[in-house]
Amino acid sequence: MRLIFVRHGEPDYDNDCLTENGILQAKMTADRLKDEGISAIYSSPMGRARQTASFTADQYGLEINILDYMHEIDWGSISPEVPLEHDGHLWTLGYKLLADEQEYVGSNRWAEHHFFRDNRCMKYYKMVSESFDEFLTGFGIVRDGKLYRCDRENDETIALFAHGGSGAVLFSHIFSLPFPFVLTSLPYGVCSISIMEFVPKKDSTIIPRLELFNDMGHLENIKPEKLTFEK
């Protein structure tokens, strides 16, 4: 199976929709995806993701299936008594953790650090990871330790439209990469396209492969506005 992940277009965060520029980006993304053989389209429930997905859905004559758990994740201290620097902002804390405490570079102990242990993001990390594994099971792709196994053959190509934060959780979980590393070292832009392959090898074991990451070539003639991190 192939999973095409698309981050939503340039957003109007206050109204949870796309800007005029974002609409143009979404239309060009649909054109870029027209020959990918997409059989099903999934989206976060949030307006900016659904609106981005709508143009590809129209292109293929498909309905948009909503995955509620793929909405943008939240962050911040789990308690007023346990303050976090930078209001718990994940991208900033991820960079600070790796730069200031380099023993965490490449380490799976990131979730034990105060920046993440006491951050609301961990609730969302767990929810997105577990829910997406359950979703993949429906396609015959079953989590097996840190990898996956193939319970039945599946050659579908599906598309998922979501967000910077919830997408970062997916990349971290699916490829067993430390979350702070994904946040800091694997940035991806609005309407970027990333493609993951789930192809069984020996004994039906699946080692997910990142076929394409942060492809924005289809947007090269569009000048994006300056964006802040997800809200």
Image: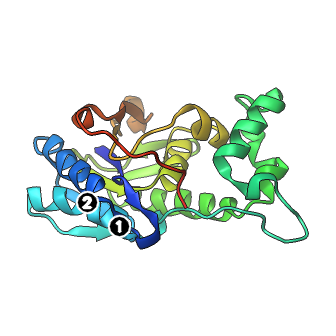
Locate residue 38, reporting x and y percent: 17, 50
Q: Which mark is residue 17?
A: 1
Give, as a three-letter code, the residue at label 2.
Ala
The quarter of the rendered structure image containing the C terminus is bottom right
Circles 1, 2 touching at the beta carbon (< 8 Å): no
Image side of residue 107 versus residue 142, left or right: right
Image side of residue 30 versus residue 67, left or right: left
Q: For the image shown, how many numbered marks are present on the structure?
A: 2
Displayed quadrant of residue 213? top left
Image side of residue 201 versus residue 58, left or right: right
Locate residue 49, reporting x and y percent: 35, 62
Give, as a three-letter code, the residue at label 1.
Cys
Disc with the residue nearer the chain's start (1 vs 2): 1
Question: What residue do we see at 26% from left, 58% from top?
Answer: 20
Which coloring applies here? rainbow
Task: Give SS at disc 2.
Answer: helix
Locate residue 149, reporting x and y percent: 43, 43
Question: What residue do we see at 36% from left, 70% from top?
Answer: 47
- What residue does disc 2 label? 53
Q: Toward the viewer: 109 or 214?
A: 214
Taking 180 as reference, is 83 above or below it?
A: below
Q: Toward the viewer: 184 or 87?
A: 87
Question: What residue do we see at 68% from left, 53% from top?
Answer: 89
Estimate how packed mark 1 is, as few (under 14), some (14 to 19) or many (20 or more) residues with alpha carbons within 10 Å: many
1 or 2: mark nearer the eye: 1
The quarter of the rendered structure image containing the N terminus is top left
Q: From where the camera sits, is residue 157 visible?
A: no
